[in-house]
């Protein structure tokens, strides 16, 4: 009985037992124990757990294999080896071992949980959800609800995902992982304020997770708050300076605030880490243009489109540079392509309207400005641009209404003020 209980330690319990010691020292002690008694399954099991805790999945799997050779019908031995395979990323073998552990002992809740995780990582979402269903029926835990919620989120069933994260947090209100997961689901639903609230709490509970800062930074950026986004991306980079994604996000956020030198610095770092990051190339191309490196700008932007020809932002960025260079037909082609890929691409819609203004195609410009306003993606420039087009088509009252609207929102918007004065002066003559 003592032997079987010792052999049934799980990795979680192993972590508790190792919390006051160093895994490597524990492994060395167990090495000596095995040399003294090479047939003792307890020593192999415990060394396997220590390897697992130290992140040595292959060594752990080898030790658990020895335990299985000694105890071929021990469900926990298969469960432990399944965990080792899971840690190693060998999901097929992990699932097979979890299957065997459950065949030997159908009541092992931890094996349903582990197999569910392996199924999810293997991409078999429905089987993973079925496993978590079994866990929840037998022994509902915050971990099981969070895992099932993650699977639902991967299936884009965000309402069901959030319901599971809610239940996980009812069981464990201070569970940072569940808060982060729910925050991510809120982002997918477009509920940015709720996402940030959850991520704030998650980070307060655990401020060591670089992906969480990156996710919150992305949320701030989605609201246009790039100053706060930069704070989060900087922290993510501090925690993981070798992440191309974090370097890129930091660079792009600086670019949005016209901080061109730090933007270029971080985009360069991102591309040194991942030369095929098309978003970083597109961002760097636009920054290079601002800094006067016109040839380098087009090299980067052309390359970004070559790497990812279905990304609307890349065409919009290149189109904007064409527009600024006065190459209106090329700009129009790029903006058209951007809007084919993403009809809600606000920048492309407004930029195309500005091109139509320059080409004196005022009705088409008005139609694009109207679309931006209908999508509730407008700003002062939208109404100002439409006012210019309305004036040119003789719709003076509507132009005046747009300019007054702009000045109501931004009293110091000098272009709108000057145009309104010009219209009123001509009307008074």
Image: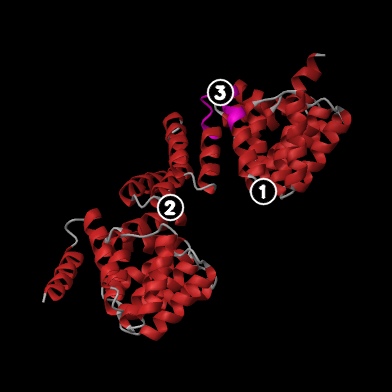
Badge 1 crowding class, 10 Å Cα cut-off, few under 14, some 14 to 19, many 20 or more, is few
Residue 415 visible at all: yes
Q: Earlier in the sequence, mark 2 or mark 3?
A: 3
Percent across and percent down for residue 121 are 68, 46
Task: Decide if residue 337 is on the left or right side of residue 405.
Answer: right
In the picture provided, is 428 more to the left or to the right than 271? left
170 within the magenta span: yes
Name the spot of residue 141 as percent of width and height, x first: 66, 25
Q: Secondary structure at mark 3?
A: loop
The reply to whether residue 80 is visible in this rendering is no
Q: Is residue 112 left or right of residue 170?
A: right
Residue to which mark 3 is pinned: 19
Q: Which residues are magenta?
A: 166-177
User: Which element is circle 1 on?
Assistant: loop
Q: Between 28 and 77, which is closer to the camera in this rendering?
A: 77
**Residue at the location (67% across, 31% down)?**
144
Q: Which residue is mark 1?
A: 155
Residue in the image at 47% along x and 35% along y = 198
| Residue at 81 percent of width and 39 percent of height | 97
Numbered circles on residues, count: 3
Foreground disc of the pair 3, 1 = 1
Structure colour scheme: secondary structure
Report, in whole angstroms, how far the alpha carbon at label 1 lies from the one at label 2: 25 Å
Rendered-image quadrant of the N terminus: top right
The residue carrying mark 2 is 246
Q: Earlier in the sequence, mark 3 or mark 1?
A: 3
379 or 50: nearer the eye? 379
The residue at 72%/49% (across/down) is 122
In whole angstroms, how far apart are the C-alphas of marks 2 and 3?
Answer: 32 Å
């Amino acid at each position: 009985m003592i032997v079987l209980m010792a052999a049934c330690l799980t990795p979680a319990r192993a972590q508790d037992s190792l919390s006051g010691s160093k895994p490597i020292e524990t492994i060395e002690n167990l090495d000596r124990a095995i040399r003294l008694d090479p047939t003792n399954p307890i020593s192999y099991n415990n060394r396997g757990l220590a390897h697992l805790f130290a992140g040595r999945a292959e060594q752990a799997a080898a030790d658990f294999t020895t335990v299985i050779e000694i105890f071929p019908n021990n469900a926990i031995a298969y469960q432990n080896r399944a965990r080792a395979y899971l840690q190693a990323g060998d999901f097929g073998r992990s699932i097979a071992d979890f299957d065997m552990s459950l065949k030997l002992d159908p009541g092992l809740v931890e094996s349903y949980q582990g197999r569910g995780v392996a199924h999810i990582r293997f991409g078999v979402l429905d089987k993973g959800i079925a496993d978590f269903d079994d866990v929840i029926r037998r022994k509902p835990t915050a971990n099981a609800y969070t895992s099932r919620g993650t699977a639902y989120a991967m299936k884009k069933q965000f309402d069901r995902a959030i319901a599971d994260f809610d239940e996980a947090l009812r069981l464990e209100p201070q569970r940072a992982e569940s808060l982060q997961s729910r925050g991510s689901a809120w982002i997918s639903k477009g509920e940015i304020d709720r996402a940030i609230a959850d991520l704030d709490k998650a980070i307060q509970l655990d401020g060591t997770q670089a992906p969480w800062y990156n996710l919150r930074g992305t949320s701030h950026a989605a609201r246009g708050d790039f100053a706060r986004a930069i704070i989060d991306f900087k922290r993510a980079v501090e925690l993981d300076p070798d992440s191309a994604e974090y370097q890129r996000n930091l660079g792009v956020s600086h670019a949005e605030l016209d901080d061109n030198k730090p933007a270029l610095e971080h985009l360069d770092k991102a591309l040194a880490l991942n030369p095929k990051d098309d978003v970083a190339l597109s961002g760097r191309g636009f920054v290079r243009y601002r800094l006067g490196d016109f040839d380098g700008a087009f090299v980067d932007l052309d390359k970004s489109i070559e790497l990812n020809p279905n990304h609307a932002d890349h065409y919009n960025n290149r189109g904007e540079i064409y527009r600024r260079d006065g190459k209106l037909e090329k700009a129009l082609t790029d903006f058209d392509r951007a809007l084919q890929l993403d009809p809600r691409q606000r920048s492309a819609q407004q930029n195309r309207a500005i091109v139509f203004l320059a080409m004196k195609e005022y009705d088409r410009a008005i139609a694009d400005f109207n679309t931006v306003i209908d999508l509730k993606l407008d700003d002062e420039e939208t109404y100002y641009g439409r006012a210019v087009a309305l004036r040119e088509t003789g719709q003076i009252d509507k132009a005046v209404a747009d300019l007054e609207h702009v000045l109501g929102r931004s009293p110091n918007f000098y272009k709108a003020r000057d145009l309104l004065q010009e219209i009123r002066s001509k009307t008074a003559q």
